[in-house]
Image (spheres, rainbow, N blue to C red):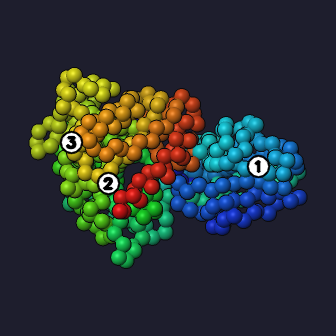
Amino acid sequence: MAFLALIGAACRTSARPTSGIPSGGKGGLRLVATGPLSAVAGTPVSISVTGAPTGGTVNIDARATLFGRTWTSSATYTASPAGTVDLATSLPVSGSYAGAHEMGLFWSMQPATPAPSIADPTAPEVVEVTATAGSRTTALHVERQLVAPGVTHRSLRPSPDGFYGEYFAPPPRATIRRPAVLIFGGSEGALGPPLPVGEVLASEGYPTLVLAYFGEPGLPESLSRIPLEYFAAAARWLAGQPGVDARRLITYGVSRGSEVALLLAAYYPSLIDGAVALVPSSTALCDLPACAGAAWTYQGRPVPFTSQTGATAPTDDPDAAIPVERVRGPIFLLCATDDQIWPSCPYSAAIEARLARFQRPGPELFTAPDAGHGVAFLLPYLPQLDEGNLIGATPAANPVGRAQAWPKLLAFLAGTRA
């Protein structure tokens, strides 16, 4: 169940932060970008080609240097009677992805060279897009920043801070207090999830604390008997940071981390306003790796747990069902219909049913068709990861699911401003 490391940032080259402006080209062929050419990761850009021969073949290639590696993708299209290709609506005849996808050339990139041992994880992703039609060619550059200008970073450690985390603060804005996000990964331990969600959410304006809870110096070695008080202390620290609206703390958990995201919001409703649970469980599961006791404790006592992974109504301890009805604020769920790790969609349905049974507002649920557990690597448009059994029924389902879920997540967080 361990998540894999991100290959997610690019070496810096020049880029033009313009939008809606065609690039130069030979023979009238043009690449046109609608949307920002330079923006925070997760922001799409619509690319189209004009000036191609009517009904002719147009090849579009994308190339980037990411984490010291070269990544590439390509697709072939047939130009419309007007001599155009629109990546948002045009179906590739062949290439690295199928179907009409606005950012398909970006998320379908594959590595063309081996990974180096050292690379800069904070550099922006810069992609060169080239269109060719016969002897005509044109190109443009697109840049996506993982860390926007003005975002600040602070490392926190158990001694002296009391917890192990990385804090990302957005550029300060006078008189504006913003919701803050407390992020946990899953059974990989350490600082998760592997995608740089903390950096990007801070770049979107949300103060974010990414928290480790085992597997780091000063922390338990494994996911066993982790006190909820540990997370609550980190949440209280986050609430006290400049610019944070202490009434709007949101937990954000992936896989096993979804349990603590929901538990913390349920056990501390006066502290936590809402929860994001990605490929979640509706029950508190046993510890790892032994599955012999509780994964979580509260006030020194084990949180009720089950060893029946996948059971939405466990029989070994029915109280293992997470009491989501106690969550004060909204809940965002993302599930995958071909989840090979555990049944995240039945689990999500169980959360919905429990909220309904207690006459509580339902969650905002996004279901990713044919996707696997790895759809929870939520940042969209990044090159494909080697996700193994975290991929769903079709290779494109995870990146398409991410692209659809990401703006819904941002809208959910924005809604907490009310």
Kind of residue sitting beneath label 3: Ile
Q: For the residue labelled by badge 1, is the local secondary structure a helix, a strand or a loop?
A: strand
Label located before the other in sequence (1 or 2): 1
Helix, strand or loop at mark 2: strand
Sequence-earlier tag: 3 or 2: 3
Single out the residue that lies furthest toward the bottom: 174
- Residue at (41% x, 53% y) in the render: 412
* Dot 3: element: strand
Ranked by sequence position, the earlier of labels 1 and 3 is 1
Nearer to the camera, 187 or 37: 37
The answer to whether 299 is drawn above or below residue 180 in the figure is above
Residue 265 on image: x %, y %: 25, 48
Q: Where residue 25 sits in the image (x, y, percent)?
A: 82, 60
Q: Which residue lies at the image location 67% right of the left edge and 42% below the top edge? A: 100
Q: Which amino acid type corresponds to the residue marked 1 in the rendered image?
A: Val
Q: Is residue 69 left or right of residue 76?
A: left
What's the residue at 30%, 28% (across, down)? 312
Residue hosting label 1: 85
Q: Decide: few, some or many residues near mark 1? Use Cα within 10 Å; few <14, some 14-19, many ≥20.
A: many
Residue placed under numbered mark 2 in the picture = 250
